[in-house]
Image (cartoon, rainbow, N blue to C red):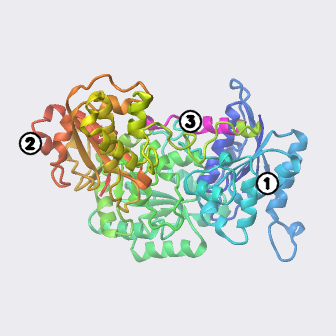
């Protein structure tokens, strides 16, 4: 399929540029001919990546030698010069981008136009698709959907672009807003997934050679100002990369680094990070004020394919967004660091935004910082990192295991190919409304499954409840109440058991919900420490979330929870101890987990202060320790308190 992709691209810095590159080359590897149209060559300092000749060559590629591969070609807009100027001065990016698409289409017609980021790429994509009669697939990022789309002089056009698009790749609040603004729900689809090639972002490979990089930059005079500081990597160093800013934790990190060094930490900082001129000046001034000139080094942005080199060179890499004004913003830095086996130092605010972020535990597979602006706590984390390289290595190893376990390489691209193919065919079949699974959960409740196995008269007696909405909690409670009457004794035990389970779960889910970011956790991590090896997991101090309710039964509930259709309920009850843990969530949703007796015996002993290993010993379950830790880390959700 010949596809035109319009968007940010190297040498533009940032996650959107990297993802557009990965998308274009991933599509080409799957046999598509991709033509990228971009104004990336016009990007100004400091947002310009330091590109050498070999890096420029990687922008295009020919994968025809691979089985069924396609190719990537790039059309670049010309920088603004006197020939493009008019009054009032402006860069006619939309005109240039649209013209390049029209010209490329004449040479080889496209089947589809895909734009990534609304301004100016979505606008140009809309114009070109309208002129050529082609389907247009639109994808947004954080700042365009969260900021630009809310500008009064942008919103009407963006609304029209999204309403006209054949496909809008968005989920969550962005999808909801699009539907509220008149976008056909069938055209809105979330395409969440791992954005990286875990083969490229991996622990194996070269680490960044700082002296060589500085020598290379020196030869390109335009980029020389992007190097600052006297540090040269002669002691271990932490790293940051991306944009500088107060809300990015950049300045708090400098204060924490100075404090950590006063406390004896032998550690430096390499920042592949830049900002607007005033931000950049303040960052350097803050470093000088803290006496860090010889312990900080700023380097230019590198192409994302060289980012793994940077991560491998660092003792740890920080991602410290705090109180970020764009709630949906979710930088890919954390995923990149973990995929490379790096020790990630991350704010809990950003941790909550990560896919399966509830499985990232401070001291186990990351270093979590509850408040990036708390320089004392952040300094303590840096002291621990500087003093325990083995622990950092173990944390990075487990982070990579987390990535390998939960993220199939390139699954995001596989789904994208399928969605774009459907958009090309203008076939909305199978689409959902902002849900990866294709829509809301439509599984029948346990009560409905139980009633459907009864005779029509019995089903009508228990299920037909005037004034009560079927499948609602109240409906389940009233069905359970009717079954508790003496007349229900003739019903099969499994029918009554199914309704009992459903009613108890619904009652637990109806509890109050704390304003804690909606992480849905069963546990909180209390007092903790760096974990050096698997056996040290005994040092985890856990407490059951105050909203999580244990439910006990005198029969096995698991066969009931596994039932998905009428007739799948067990034929008889299996006696024995059985436990559930239930935690409420928004709009009646929540989490339910089946707990083995060995773990259930620990629940009332978790206080957030006593190490898990001590509790296991106290209740004489040491033989089950590995199983219990596995359940806590893998089947439950654990986040810092």
Name the residue located 60 percent from the left edge and 47 percent from the top edge. 433
Name the residue located 32 percent from the left edge and 52 percent from the top edge. 362
Alpha-carbon distance for marks 2 and 1?
66 Å
Residue 611 in the image, given as x and y percentages of width and height: 17, 48
In this rendering, the answer to whether 91 lies above or below 357 is below
Q: Tags 2 and 1 in contact by the CB under 8 Å rule?
A: no
Residue 263 in the image, given as x and y percentages of width and height: 26, 66
Residue bounds of the magenta highlight: 404-421
Bin the neighbour count of mark 3 within 10 Å (Cα to Cα): few under 14, some 14-19, many 20 and up. some
In this rendering, the answer to whether 260 lies above or below 20 is below
Residue 135 visible (yes or no):
yes
State the residue in front, 640 or 318: 640
State the residue in front, 116 or 401: 116
Residue 471's image quarter?
top left
Label annotation for residue 411: 3
- For disc 1, the marked residue is 126
Q: Is residue 415 magenta?
A: yes
Residue 90 in the image, given as x and y percentages of width and height: 80, 71
Bin the neighbour count of mark 2 within 10 Å (Cα to Cα): few under 14, some 14-19, many 20 and up. few
Q: Dividing the image into 4 quarters, which one contains the C terminus? A: bottom left
> Which label's residue is closer to the chain start, 3 or 2?
3
- For disc 2, the marked residue is 618
Residue 233 visible (yes or no):
no
Q: Mark 1: which secondary structure?
A: helix
In this rendering, the answer to whether 265 lies above or below 447 is below
Alpha-carbon distance for marks 3 and 1?
28 Å
Residue 135's image quarter?
top right
> Which label's residue is closer to the chain start, 3 or 1?
1
Bin the neighbour count of mark 1 within 10 Å (Cα to Cα): few under 14, some 14-19, many 20 and up. many
Name the residue located 63 percent from the left edge and 43 percent from the top edge. 22
Q: Is residue 583 magenta?
A: no
């Amino acid at each position: 399929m010949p596809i035109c992709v319009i968007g940010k691209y190297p040498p533009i810095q940032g996650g959107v540029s990297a993802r557009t590159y990965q998308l274009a080359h991933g599509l080409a590897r799957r046999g598509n001919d991709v033509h990228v149209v971009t104004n990336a060559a016009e990007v100004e300092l400091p947002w310009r990546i330091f590109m050498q000749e070999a890096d420029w060559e990687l922008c295009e590629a020919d994968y025809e030698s691979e089985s069924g591969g396609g190719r990537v070609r790039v059309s670049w807009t010309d920088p603004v010069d006197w020939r493009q100027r008019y009054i009032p001065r402006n860069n006619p990016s939309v005109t240039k981008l649209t013209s390049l698409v029209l010209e490329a289409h004449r040479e080889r017609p496209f089947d589809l136009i895909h734009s990534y980021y609304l301004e100016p790429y979505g606008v140009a994509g809309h114009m070109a698709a309208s002129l050529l009669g082609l389907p247009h697939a639109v994808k947004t990022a954080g700042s365009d959907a969260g900021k630009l789309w809310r500008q009064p002089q942008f919103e009407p056009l963006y609304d029209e672009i999204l309403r006209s698009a054949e496909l809008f790749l968005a989920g969550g609040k962005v999808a909801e807003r699009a539907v509220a603004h008149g976008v056909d729900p069938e055209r809105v689809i979330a395409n969440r997934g791992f954005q990286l090639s875990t083969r490229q972002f991996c622990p194996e490979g070269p680490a960044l050679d700082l002296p060589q990089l500085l020598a290379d930059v020196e030869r390109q005079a335009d980029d020389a100002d992007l190097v600052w500081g006297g540090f040269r990597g002669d002691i271990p160093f932490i790293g940051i990369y991306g944009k500088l800013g107060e809300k990015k934790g950049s300045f708090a990190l400098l204060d924490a680094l100075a404090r950590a060094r006063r406390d004896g930490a032998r550690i430096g900082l390499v920042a592949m990070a830049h900002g607007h001129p005033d931000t950049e000046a303040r960052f350097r001034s803050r470093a000088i004020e803290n006496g860090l000139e010889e312990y900080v080094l700023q380097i230019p942005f590198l192409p994302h394919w060289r980012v793994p080199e940077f991560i491998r060179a660092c003792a740890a890499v920080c991602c410290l967004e705090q109180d970020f004004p764009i709630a949906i913003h979710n930088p890919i830095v954390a995923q990149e660091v973990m995929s490379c086996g790096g020790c990630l130092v991350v704010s809990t605010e950003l941790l909550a935004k990560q896919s399966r972020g509830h499985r990232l535990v401070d001291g186990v597979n990351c270093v979590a910082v509850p408040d990036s602006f708390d320089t004392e706590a952040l300094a303590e984390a840096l002291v621990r990192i500087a003093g325990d390289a083995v622990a950092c290595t173990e944390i990075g190893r487990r982070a990579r295991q987390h990535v390998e376990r939960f993220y199939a390489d390139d699954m995001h691209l596989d789904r994208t190919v399928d969605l774009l193919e459907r958009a090309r065919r203008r076939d909305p079949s199978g689409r959902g409304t902002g849900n990866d699974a294709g829509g809301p959960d439509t599984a029948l409740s346990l009560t409905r499954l139980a009633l459907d196995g009864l005779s029509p008269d019995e089903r009508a007696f228990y299920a037909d409840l005037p004034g009560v909405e079927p499948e609602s909690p109240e409906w389940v409670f009233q069905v359970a109440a009717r079954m508790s009457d003496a007349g229900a004794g003739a019903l099969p035990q499994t029918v009554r058991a199914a309704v009992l389970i459903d009613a108890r779960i619904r009652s637990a889910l109806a509890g109050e919900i704390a304003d804690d970011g909606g992480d849905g956790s069963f546990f909180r991590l209390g007092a903790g420490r760096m974990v050096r090896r698997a056996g040290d997991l005994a040092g985890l101090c856990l407490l059951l979330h105050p909203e999580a309710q244990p439910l006990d039964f005198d029969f096995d509930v698991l066969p009931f929870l596994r039932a998905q259709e009428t007739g799948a309920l067990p034929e008889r009850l299996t006696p024995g101890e059985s436990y559930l843990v239930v935690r409420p969530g928004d709009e009646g949703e929540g989490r339910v987990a089946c707990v083995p007796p060995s773990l259930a015996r620990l629940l009332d002993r978790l206080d957030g202060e006593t190490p898990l290993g001590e509790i296991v010993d106290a209740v004489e379950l040491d033989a089950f320790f590995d199983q219990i830790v596995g359940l806590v880390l893998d089947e439950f959700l654990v986040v810092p308190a």
